[in-house]
Image (cartoon, coloured by chain):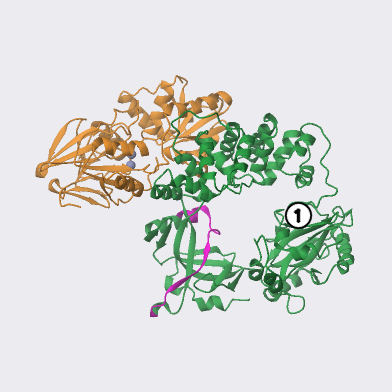
Amino acid sequence: MSADFSWIKPAPHGIYVEPADCWVDPSQAVDNALVTHGHADHARGGHGATIATPETLAIMKLRYRTGAEDENGEIPTKATPVAYGETIRLKGGVDATYIPAGHVLGSAQILLEHAGEKIIVTGDYKRRHDPTCPPFKVTKCDVLITEATFGLPVFTHPPISGEIAKITERLAAYPDACVLVGAYALGKAQRVIAELRAAGHMDPIYLHGAMEKMCRLYQEHGVDLGELRLVSDHSKDDMRGAVVVAPPSAMNDRWSRRLPDPITAMASGWMRVRQRARQRNVELPLIISDHADWTELTQTIRDVDPQESWITHGREEALLRWCQLNQRRARALAMVGREEEDE
Amino acid sequence: MNEFAALIDALVYTRSRNEKLRLIAEYLRNTSDPDRGWALAALTDGLDFPAVKSSTIRNAMKERVDPVLWTLSRDFVGDTAETASLLWPEPIADQPEAPGVSEAVSLLSAMTRANVLTELPALLDRLDSSGRYALLKLATGAMRIGISARLGKTAFAQAFGVSVDDVEEYWHALKPPYSGLFEWAADGGEPPDTENIPLFRPFMLAHPLEDTIVSMDEYAAEWKWDGIRVQLVHVAGQTRLYSRSGDDISATFPELLSALEIPAVLDGELLVRGTAQGGEEGGAASFNALQQRLGRKTVSKKMLAEAPAFVRLYDAINIEGDDLRALPWENRRARLEEFVPRLPESHFDISQIVEAEDFAQLAKIREGTRDDAIEGLMLKKRDAPYIAGRKTGLWYKWKRDPLLIDCVMMYAQRGSGKRSSFYSDYTFGCWNGDPDQGAELLPVGKAYSGFTDAELKKLDKFVRQNTLNRFGPVREVEKSMVLEIAFDSVHSSKRHKSGLAMRFPRIHRIRWDKPAHEADRIDNLKALMRD
Ligand SMILES: [Zn+2]
Ligand SMILES: [Zn+2]
């Protein structure tokens, strides 16, 4: 590895931007954090200052009270919004630009520029259409720090329309049951609901309590989710023939006993592998992911065409191998706390 | 193939046994012959296509996918057929339509080692990802989707409203695609003829005794021998030897075929002559000695002379055409005792009854079984008929307590199937001396059971956080985790660096509390050896 780009220092708990004394997506509390998006393996509370898109800051305010006043009327974490396409000048002559990543509401790639060098931290991203956020924007740079959650060639996510149809077909076949879709509370749940609406499913959709606030936040940001109801406000019979959305942790929980004959579905890229679905007791696997699949990851490296790719956050080995086979310089960064992300 | 693939996918994701039965029954009713017969064979006994092996799939893939990417993918997915079905490149040119099950079976049967690497890809090109998965599973003979042969037969019985016991009985008289079975059950034809065929009869099986206490007036006790359960059948001049699962293992033990010349169906334990079990007089060798003879398709003269096999009989299902299954155990035993003297002593004896006044005395006898018989005791209800399967309260196995030893985890590997995302197979070792004086760990065994799901998660986490080295799917770990290993016996072995091999090692307890240097030494394990 050449001595270039030495102003940026990948560490196990985040990416350190030395001249600006700030971290990208640190997994520990730091003085200055740049945050790509609101998922827990990227965003956390307790930083001195957080710079993120307004949408991500809204999510972090909801989850971690980022930018909110404490009981003394003080704001422990200062929040600085940067809209898509805007650039913020940091200390030490570093410019940070937030670019859409197409992952979830507010998700951004962060372009860092210093001394004529351009480095992009993608955070999480995908290249598919998503009605809940603007699409990934290809941006040229010298170093692309890319995620690799689904960095194995077995992962090719099918078109979402077919997966959404599995839900509606199952409901048609079992009109007295309900389809319980396990989906992460931030991003996946709202995307599944928005795609159901786009497919013409206009019936009320029932939510687990843990979903409510995030869905509300999406609606406030102009994402149309149609009529949403809370499971706790309704009887079993109300929910026959309906779609119910809950976080994956609630699926095999006692909570689901209040549902009428639930057919358990799970919306996740991992559902591509049968044994993964079986492990989670899923009856209706839906291969829906907010991460880039193998084709998207490799296409993105081709499109961005950086001098170097730094791979993090998932199955680095295979993507590293692909880079090697395609004569592209690459290295793997070891990050802690990211392997467990389960989206 | 599409309907079969859809069935396989539905079965993979179905938890309820009743729903599985319903899905299979529905498929069997709605599918025509002989497709449904081949499908049933694939679900139950499995089909064998000599030219198509797991290695064939790997070789076909390596021509299409970078070998490193293939290996990484295979390690993650945990199943060769599934990995290949996901990675198979979609064909560019238009393809003939997807084959039916029978067409696929006849194409697979026609493949040879010489043409399989062109013929199999041509077949895969005609299928989508689900179809490829089903085809590769069917072709390599291992569905592993949680469907037992018994479940398949029960579904067949349910589909056509016939008795599952009848299905079991006729099953072994027929070969895939079981046309006689479908003619009888689905089309109201005559039942298949089973009179003059050396058929396998399903075994009567035992439950573990656990905490139950039984009266010795109602139950008889026998040693539980450490060999393999077999059924020897002679009818119409033919003799067959079947294993516990009903596999025909006649070729592996030819000396037994000529030893039975009277029509009979006998149940017993296959053992090799020796002294480790049952002492000098008429004793048997350890399982280790028997193992040298298992799984062979042909046997050398030397092997026959060095490790002669015999059957220790404990039940009779049929003697000279009399079906004895409805009789109480006591009466069958009496018939067996009368019959055994008519058999050559060289190849048969009878499993002795263990006499005990009461259960307490029997418990004492069991304590001492380590010298007499490796495995423990069997308890059989005196008035019970011979009933196929495992019916509660009729037969119990009362294994002796396992041996225990503290070992240190050395390597871990991902499991297969449902456990493919967990490091669930552990290689562990004992010290070859004093660890504080620089002794090393030598691997002594491998275990992948004995822990709860919650413990598995913790072990998996330990492996991930304490990895020293990666060798493909194997991780070498920090030598700090002590595992208390339970095992049935330990024998000398040339295959292992430590010179020892354990039987049935499993994790008994995870010793989070114990420092690694306090784990046992090889010498402690050697002291438990009995060969
Ligand atoms: Zn994310
Ligand atoms: Zn992430």
**Residue A254 at x, y = what percent?**
52, 40
**Residue A257 at x, y = what percent?**
55, 36
Question: Which image quarter has ligand 1?
Answer: top left
**B282 horizontally vs B416: left or right:** right
Please tell me whether residue B380 is drawn above or below residue A255 in the rendered image.
Answer: below
State which quarter of the image contains the N terminus of chain B: top right
Please tell me whether residue B59 is drawn above or below residue B482 in the rendered image.
Answer: above
Q: Give the class, few, some or many, for how many residues have Cα within 10 Å of label 1's Cα (few <14, many ≥20).
A: many
Please state which of residues B277 and A261 is positioned toward the viewer in this rendering.
Answer: B277
Q: How many marks?
A: 1
Please state which of residues B242 and B436 is positioned toward the viewer in this rendering.
Answer: B242
**A170 horizontally vs B62: left or right:** right
**B361 horizontally vs B62: left or right:** right
Question: For the point 35% across and 30% down, which residue is it?
Answer: A128
Q: Residue B225 falls in which quadrant of the image?
A: bottom right
**Residue B70 at x, y = what percent?**
42, 47
**B182 horizontally vs B504: left or right:** right
Residue at image mark 1: B203
Q: Which chain is orange?
A: A
State which quarter of the image contains the C terminus of chain B: bottom right
Please state which of residues B116 and A184 is positioned toward the viewer in this rendering.
Answer: B116
Please tell me whether residue A201 is drawn above or below residue A51 in the rendered image.
Answer: above
Q: Amino acid at mark 1?
A: Phe
Please state which of residues A73 and A201 is positioned toward the viewer in this rendering.
Answer: A201
* Residue B105 visible at all: yes
Q: Residue B19 falls in which quadrant of the image?
A: top right
Report the magenta residues as a range.
B437-457
Question: For the point 46% across and 77% down, which residue is it?
Answer: B432
Q: Residue B11 falls in which quadrant of the image?
A: top right
Q: Which chain is green?
A: B
